[in-house]
Amino acid sequence: MKSQLGLAFVVAAVSGFPAISSQSSAVARAPVVSVARLPAGGIQPQLAVGGDGTAHVVYFKGEPANGDVYYATLAESGVWSTPIRVNSEPGSAIATGTVRGAQLAIGRSGRVHVAWNGSSRATPKAHAGATPMLYSRLDPKRQAFEPQRNLIQFATGLDGGGALAADSKGRVLVAWHAGGPESKGEGDRRVWLTTSTDDGATFDRERAVSDASTGACGCCGMDALIDRRGSFFLLYRSAREVFNRDTYLLRSTDSGRTFTTAKLQEWHLGACPMSTFALAETADGVVAAWETAGQVQFSRIGAEGAPGRRIEAPGSDRARRHPSLAVNTRGDVLLAWSEGTAWQRGGAVAWQVFDRSDRPTTELGKAAGVPVWGLVAAHARRDGGFTIVY
């Protein structure tokens, strides 16, 4: 099977998943893409890579409305560690709708941080019994997670998923969108941010960081990133005048005190598409990925925060959702996504690798088996290849 550019396309087997491969001696440099299945019953992976190449993964398991979050590591050999439950109160996580799952970040000294939307059973509650944004971190011995905490002090109305990021300086940020005390609907929802400077031991009072005029799509997810320069990035969907479900990027260069706003793409839709988003860092800046009208794409964000041209996934399929990004040391970008997934319906995983000039370097890849409420997460390996987990 030849690629569009005559390059090799290789899919390796991980954790017993069958391999699909096609090679040419002239194209041995193409990145190898592997797929790995979560431990039995797991869905909605999110991951981050440690300095030793180990992938740290969180995922959901159990009843979709009231389940649990688990943490495990995936070695480059394909071996999973023994999972550790993250939530201290059983049944306090939710997977229904795909967009509300746990988020993961690696902070100072390799500390693991996790945040997730609380289920109807979750405690502690937010103000007046509202849905909490829950947070926990792995203890220093890496044997158990601390008791879960709610981070919402007053900005209640959590619906879609939140976002989490951390860095080597001990900063941790957790963001979510909600109406707050005076909200009248999606059109005035805001993105709210709480930050920690002591590795998540304490968090400040949340504050609104998005423009109220954009609103926020109530049942869509978000993503967050702190880059090596210390800038904060938040990616979310608007609900401006209800019919404008545009993708917006917030960027702060002063530790979250002020933000600039960039509209990445418009989408006129009078309904919530239940989207998720992805951010990843390259040697030159940040890459952002999102869905619009059933197509996934990414854009490179320059050092000054300006978005570049949009690069769409190739092919004619328009049932693409839930993008994930990974960047290897050579600068290749893997864009992975789910296809055919919808409310109470599973689908397939698909992917495309692009070089530093955003040209496809492999043929479009696809594998079946994304479960109901599932999505995919990708990371780059030290050998220059990529692994997609689902």
Image: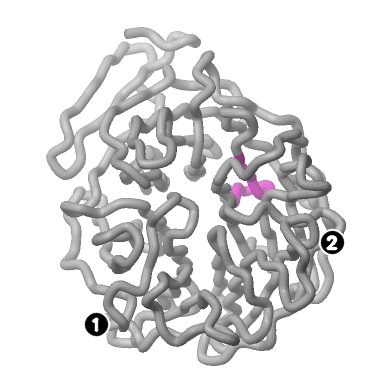
**Of the pair 67 and 22, the residue shown nearer to us:** 67
Q: Earlier in the sequence, mark 1 or mark 2?
A: 1
Q: Position of residue 122 (x, y in %)?
A: 40, 78
Question: Is the N terminus in the top left, top right, bottom left or bottom right quadrant?
Answer: top left
Amino acid carrying label 2: it is Asp
Residue 381 lies within the magenta run: no
Secondary structure under tag 1 reads loop
> What residue is drawn where x is 38% and y is 57%?
95
Residue position for label 1: 143
Q: From mark 1 to mark 2, how far is it between C-alphas?
A: 41 Å
Side of 92 where 282 appears, left or right: right
Q: Position of residue 130 (x, y in %)?
A: 55, 78
Q: Is residue 365 visible?
A: yes
Question: Closer to the camera: disc 1 or disc 2?
Answer: 2
* Mark 1 burial class by Cα count in 10 Å: few <14, some 14-19, many 20+: few
Q: Quadrant of residue 209?
A: bottom right
> Number of numbered discs present?
2
**Of the pair 70 and 68, the residue shown nearer to us:** 68
User: Any mark on residue 124, and which?
Assistant: none
Q: Check if mark 1's residue and mark 2's residue have beta carbons within 8 Å.
A: no
* Mark 2 burial class by Cα count in 10 Å: few <14, some 14-19, many 20+: some
Residue position for label 2: 211
Determine whether 252 is above or below 358 in the image.
below
Determine whether 152 is above or below 369 in the image.
below
> What residue is drawn where x is 24% and y is 50%?
38
Side of 50 where 288 appears, left or right: right
Secondary structure under tag 2 reads loop
Can you name the residue that lies furthest to the left here?
16
Give the magenta part as a residue range. 281-290
The kind of secondary structure the magenta stretch mainly shows is strand
> What residue is drawn where x is 31% and y is 24%?
10
